[in-house]
Amino acid sequence: MSGLGDDRNSDRTGENTVKKMASPFLSDTVSAPEATFFLPDTDVPDLEFAGIKAQYAALREVIAPQIAGVFRHCQFVNGPEITELEDALADFAGVNHAIGLSSGTDALIAPMLAEGIGQGDAVFLPAFTFTATAEVPLLLGAAPVFVDVDPRTFNIDLADLEAKIDVVRAEGVLKPRAIIPVDLFGLPAEHAALNQIADKEGLFLLADAAQSFGGRRGNRRVGSLAPVTATSFFPAKPLGCYGDGGAVFTDDAKLAAGVRSVRNHGQGAEKYAIDQVGLNARLDTLQAAILLAKLPSLDREIEARNRLADRYDSFLADICITPQRDADAHSAFAQYCILVDDRDGVQSRLAEASIPTAIYYPKPMHVQEPYARFGDGPGSLPVSEGLSRCILALPIHGYMRDEVADRIGEMVRLAITRT
Ligand SMILES: Cc1ncc(COP(=O)(O)O)c(C=O)c1O
């Protein structure tokens, strides 16, 4: 990477003389001049689906020094930025413990592993979600129990959840152990009611907030709404890094210690004293540095997403189903999804107008091949199946200009009304 202390140039120009290190063991090594970390400019298209380039263009001046700092100390694993980020995330979310993990998926697996969930256990989760939510119980030897979702919020349906818990108890084959509700598209699920159900049933509650970090319910932020919360820092998420990353949030000191141990091969108090079976699931120092640079902008970006969602609503609310608004819940608007009957037609008309869209999710989990044996097949979860047929996500991100959102709103309106 030539930008890192460009010693070849220095050699040629005679400036910044390259010094040999004093150590006899490092005779071929040269000391780099002060790092002049170079981050390139990016061409930002007018219309981006998730705004990764637009955000980078806006924040590169604060991201560059953070990255350069990591190359200065070269502690790429467990560097000081990890603790700094964990403290900042815990403060932001309003919890005692935030633990960096290598992905959102690992942030779901680690607390479940620390809690000892596995063979013979039933884990309740919505069928209308990303695969990661469902793969976690299976990887641990537990059984996913698919629950339908609410047709307005797209989040787990509380009545169906209670019914499914009753069925599993009555069957007596699996032990109800955990619930993983998902804050789909950024809208926090009904966590107060979920906490009550989990308490009443004695179940471990792990919120999948991969899409909702930065959102709130009342004055409480995502991360503090459930006893344990997992989020993802995948680049397209509301708080994204430049690779994979995730975090767990909790006030429970014992669980936090368990997750810290699991992410580091199950290590105990000493390096080679292993307490439990674990993973290599640590967050990279470089990703932590990038997240430290981005976190201060998150609230502003979420406000922008909400403002754009209002603009979309004003074009679309009378001709299709637009996202649920709830006075108490402030969505992170990871996605702005509408429901339209002729979804595929609308999508192809928008593609002709160069407007990118996406389908989350074309198939619910209970009809996906690896999970079908845990469900009751097509027709068993009608809301999830119906949503899969008519859901369509429109571009949204914290750096989209209002005029661009208005243009998209108009085009989507046209694409729907032409059907
Ligand atoms: C609902 C949900 N859960 C879990 C994950 C997994 O996160 P990651 O991709 O960081 O492993 C995602 C990522 O897309 C997600 O959307």
Image: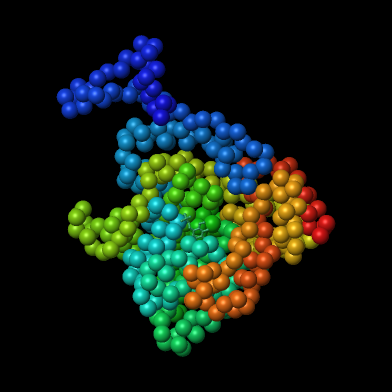
**What percent of the width, then of the height, locates residue 242?**
47, 43
Name the residue furthest top: 14
Left or right: 345 as drawn, with respect to 219: right
Name the residue furthest left: 24
According to the image, what is the colour scheme of the structure? rainbow
Residue at (41, 29) in percent of width and height:
1
Vertical placement of residue 132 versus 64, above or below: below
Q: Is residue 95 visible?
A: no
Residue at (37, 24) in percent of width and height:
5
Residue 360 sits in which quadrant? bottom right
Name the residue furthest front: 369
Vertical placement of residue 91 versus 109, above or below: above
Left or right: 293 as drawn, with respect to 396: left
Name the residue furthest right: 418
Quarter of the figure that contains the C terminus: bottom right
**What percent of the width, then of the height, locates residue 187?**
58, 61
**What percent of the width, then of the height, locates residue 63?**
47, 36
**What percent of the width, then of the height, locates residue 162?**
52, 80
Q: Is residue 216 visible?
A: yes
Q: Count numbered badges in the picture.
A: 0
Residue at (20, 22) in percent of width and height:
22
Residue 120 sits in which quadrant? bottom left
Residue 333 sits in which quadrant? bottom right
Vertical placement of residue 405 versus 248, above or below: above
Left or right: 368 as drawn, with respect to 114: right
Residue at (48, 69) in percent of width and height:
370
